[in-house]
Image: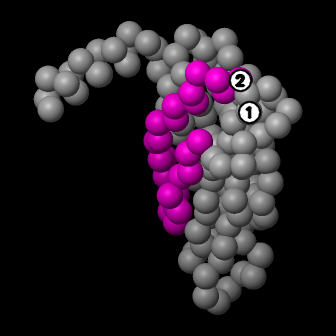
Amino acid sequence: MIDTVLVAAKTVVSSKGDGPALDVSGAASRVFLLTLEITNIIEQESFELSIFSSADGAAWDAKPLVTYPQEFYRGEYPLLLDSGASRREVRARPLGSSALGRGVETPMFEFGLQLKEIPPDVLREASAEAKILA
């Protein structure tokens, strides 16, 4: 079961860039829980983060698998990621932060990102419960 750090805690970002690639081909499930933890942010600043995938580890898709909505405050933000059966690797790509209004001109955002595989039995149980409630 994959349970790892995709971006180290307290990573500081002030521009666009790519995080390291993570091989998810050995996962029993292709669904993961991402947890974005914002530990520091400048007032009136926003930040966007996307997760990209690759089938071969060399060519990366132009369109992200998932994008976090803009976040403005410290805290933890969960998001489900379905990597798809053909995806071998995933990586985070901060799309950059932007400072609004007055103050510091260079944006700064401090965060970490964890990725945890959701076991197949938990997914089956959740799907069955969702069908009952629908």
Q: Position of residue 48 (x, y in %)?
A: 61, 59
Image disc number at residue 88: 2
> 10 Å neighbourhood of mark 1: few (<14), some, or many (≥20)?
some
- Work out whether mark 2 precedes mark 1 in sequence or the reverse, and give the earlier one: 1
Kind of residue indicated by mark 2: Arg
Callout 2 touching callout 1 (CB < 8 Å): yes
Mark 1 is on which residue type?
Ser
Q: Is residue 93 above or below residue 1?
A: below
- What residue is pinned by disc 1? 54
Q: Is residue 72 left or right of residue 97?
A: left
Q: Is residue 5 left or right of residue 122?
A: right
Does residue 125 appear left or right of residue 57 in this picture?
Answer: left
Say if 76 sits above or below 85 in the image.
Answer: below
Q: Residue at x 52, y 31 (%)?
A: 82
State the residue in front, 15 or 29: 29
Q: Is residue 64 at all visible to an observer of this figure?
A: yes
Secondary element under disc 1, as helix, strand or loop, is strand
Span of residues in magenta? 65-88
Where residue 123 appears, x then y in whole percent? 37, 19
Residue found farthest to the right: 58
Residue 40 is drawn in which quadrant?
bottom right
Q: Compared to 78, does 85 lie above or below?
A: above
Query: Which residue: 53% across, 39% down?
Result: 35
Viewport quadrant of the C terminus: top left
Label 2, label 1: how far apart the Cα atoms are = 6 Å
Q: Is residue 116 left or right of residue 106?
A: left
Asked whether the viewer can see residue 20, the reply is no
